[in-house]
Image: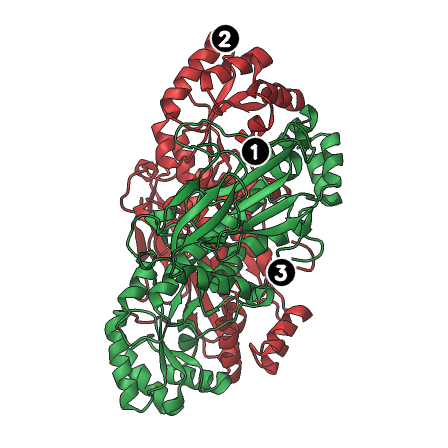
Chain colours: A red, B green
Amino acid sequence: MTDDWSSALLTDRYELTMLQGALRSGAAHRRTVFEMFARRLPDQRRYGVVAGTGRFLDALRDFRFDTATLDFLADNEIVDDSTLKWLADYRFSGDIWGYGEGDIYFPGSPILVVEGTFAESVVLETVALSIFNHDSAIASAASRMVTAAGGRPLVEMGSRRTHEMAAVAAARAAYLTGFATTSNLEASRRYGVPTAGTSAHAFILAHDSERHAFAAQLDALGHGTTLLVDTFDVERAVRTAIELAGDDLGGVRLDSGDLAATASRVRALLDRHGATRTRILVTGDLDEYAIQALAIAPVDGYGVGTALVTGSGSPTVSLVYKLVARARSGDADDRLESVAKRSVGKPSKGGRKWAARRRDDRGVATAELVYGYEPEHDPGTRPLLRRLVDGGEIVGAEPLSAARERHERAVAELPEEARRMSAGEAAIPTLFERYVHD
Amino acid sequence: MTDDWSSALLTDRYELTMLQGALRSGAAHRRTVFEMFARRLPDQRRYGVVAGTGRFLDALRDFRFDTATLDFLADNEIVDDSTLKWLADYRFSGDIWGYGEGDIYFPGSPILVVEGTFAESVVLETVALSIFNHDSAIASAASRMVTAAGGRPLVEMGSRRTHEMAAVAAARAAYLTGFATTSNLEASRRYGVPTAGTSAHAFILAHDSERHAFAAQLDALGHGTTLLVDTFDVERAVRTAIELAGDDLGGVRLDSGDLAATASRVRALLDRHGATRTRILVTGDLDEYAIQALAIAPVDGYGVGTALVTGSGSPTVSLVYKLVARARSGDADDRLESVAKRSVGKPSKGGRKWAARRRDDRGVATAELVYGYEPEHDPGTRPLLRRLVDGGEIVGAEPLSAARERHERAVAELPEEARRMSAGEAAIPTLFERYVHD
């Protein structure tokens, strides 16, 4: 966003009224630990993907109550004057640790640990959950699509099926799981995600004939372009495309019909005319299951839209942000007491946590270890929490490519059954290892 | 957004490369008609709700290619110099008609009709679809929740379960269907949606006891506030609340357990202590079915989160934006020819369209009429297309309250079976009335 942007009102009203209550009672200044975690994985999948960390750090940087924001709160009598005064000086001054972006999570994984005063930590709840719930939902679905595609490139093209800003974040989340490109230009400007594109039926229909349209596209974009060949009759369109572009036509796109059967016919036709390098891109309501079903079809790439941006059935991943420990004061050496509610059906495990992934001799993950204390170094485990914010200073920002590489490594480390598309148990168990509160 | 904001890159790359091709061929300057419609309703619901019109007009106003945007396109070689030159001068100069925001739609309803040159109309596709697909998905789910609540107030509180900007739009969409309030502060600042809030378990746990927390909240926010009573033991919490606030306690919130049974017990307890006006707000994974199931419980309001912001199973509504007619030139008097692709399974009906809702003597809707020509005035029908943009000038902007009132009238006009929660047919048939292309 621009320099004027504040993320501070992307917030539930109750975060600020709780702040007012806590300022009144004094609890505002107590040292606390909030933790973000999920009680379950969506749709009985085998693993979830942490995404949104980079965007959360951007939102944290922009989380400040400028004059316009304070005026809004005052005019609408959301909070009282002393709370406004406190908000005017707001800068998060605590510490944040988190799973590396792109890493895998399981039920109970403490993917974000926020340590600061109650006041400075509670007001971050809404924006933190919005970002992680959305981005992790997209990444968790996208990662399975990458697995299903088995090395063939995936194009993210779902912008039109989701909120226009969610689309930008979705393109980023898809890319970090291994998608090759996105159609979304803002995702390229903002995050450097590579873009790709073909053309739409409207382009064909705007011309006097398909031939005119193909000629115009080839003329404007070169022979490396991808022509959409299913507006009228696919085989006739492919013949026209080869007549115009010769055997160096970049690609053709199929968006309808029986994609496997059509791709086979088109591949044979292209090969017969010497266009053996012309790629076949398929699109049209693909999800991870449809992608996998096309594994034996002569397809060179997949465009995924709706299923990607809606998390393939799970548009959110039910991450929560819970107070797990607090001291009686703001003193750094005051003891943190673990706290948890006792609501029916929603158990929480109190206390500050640490986490590591245990691996066997071959480097295959065998368990998610969650500790109630800081564990000793253990060569058989990989520590999962990175320092993101140190005394208010953002220290964990990294290029998107780092998250993309981390994700590839984290998936490779999982046992083979984690990459199955079918519903089932989490790929590895979460063990609350020698957990002090058990 | 701020003055610097441009919505122009919330766009698929292919919109701009198609533009380049069409500028090369000359098709760019042809007069065209694009239409937005849905081929089906989500989840076999009885009707859909048009939402996003106001936000689309804002995005249209901000759709311009400023220097930073053009530099991005040039640096990344998205389009060539002549296309950049054309984009630098871009202002949509055509005409747009649309269903009134908040009105109902059915399969085939032409909810947006864009008439302009191919070039100026095609580049709006992505952002228009993003906005209408998202907002209509939320509004279509929200409207059913309003029906299910039977007059009891609904609070939108799903911000944390969706992308942080989608949350703002979702709060707006929910409000226009009849939700009373939202938790989202930015939706209040930006669109004037009234806000509400209670408190979270973290607030209770940050204090030494529930009693301390309740006292702090009552002290800070007054006795009209709503206390969260299910952190430990509901009945004990209600007794504590009444001890502290007396019989003028505003409300209590239940977020877990068997909500109907708990609400009954809490109501009896409140009444026994004279707190007969204290309201009971229930929250916790509610959707339209859960709301309906609570109809006979002593509940005074519902808070809805996840199900609202994810469209209760349909986070998008598959609206498409299709070229339906074009002339051979840009001349206003050149005849528009209807066009349509012939893809398998995705039939399109070509030609510019008009629409009206037929009503019987009692004012009950009986059919959605879609015409291939401009119909004569007919007192038995209600015309559905409003002028939104006239020669590039935005003329259809209206306050959100107008959409809210229109929605209430449009739902009231539907036959009774439209308000059933069960899956079924569209409430009224769409008739392509004396349609010129049939």
Sequence order check, earlier mark of 3 and 2: 3
Amino acid found under the numbered disc labelled 1? Ala
Neighbor class of circle 1 (other Cα within 10 Å; few <14, some 14-19, many 20+) is many
**Image height of B436 relative to A435, above or below:** above
Q: Please, what secondary structure does the residue beneath circle 1 have?
A: strand
Instruction: Count neighbours of disc 3 (C-alpha within 10 A) and say few if under 14, some if 14 to 19, many if 20 or more.
Output: some
- Asked if the residue at tag 1 contacts the one at tag 2, i.e. Cβ–Cβ closer than 8 Å, the answer is no
Apparent side of residue A83 relative to residue A363 in the rendered image (left or right): right
- Residue at 40% x, 20% y is A262
Figure check: A63 above or below B78: below
Report which residue position mark 3 lands on. A62
Which element is circle 2 on? loop
Q: Nearer the viewer, residue A139 or B96?
A: B96
Residue occupying image coordinates x 61% and y 35%: B32
Residue A111: in sight, yes or no? no
- What residue is disc 1 on? B325
Which quadrant, please, contains the C terminus of chain B?
top left
Total marks in image:
3
Which circle, 3 or 2, is nearer the viewer? 2
Q: Distance between the Cα atoms at labels 2 and 1?
A: 35 Å
Q: Which residue is mark 2?
A: A273
- CB contact under 8 Å: marks 3 and 2: no
In the rendering, at what x and y percent does residue A40 appear?
Answer: 33, 54
Image height of B254 relative to A51, above or below: below
Q: Residue at x 56, y 37 (%)?
A: A183
Q: Are marks 2 and 1 on the same chain?
A: no
Q: Considering the numbered disc 3 on the image, is that residue within a helix, a strand or a loop?
A: loop
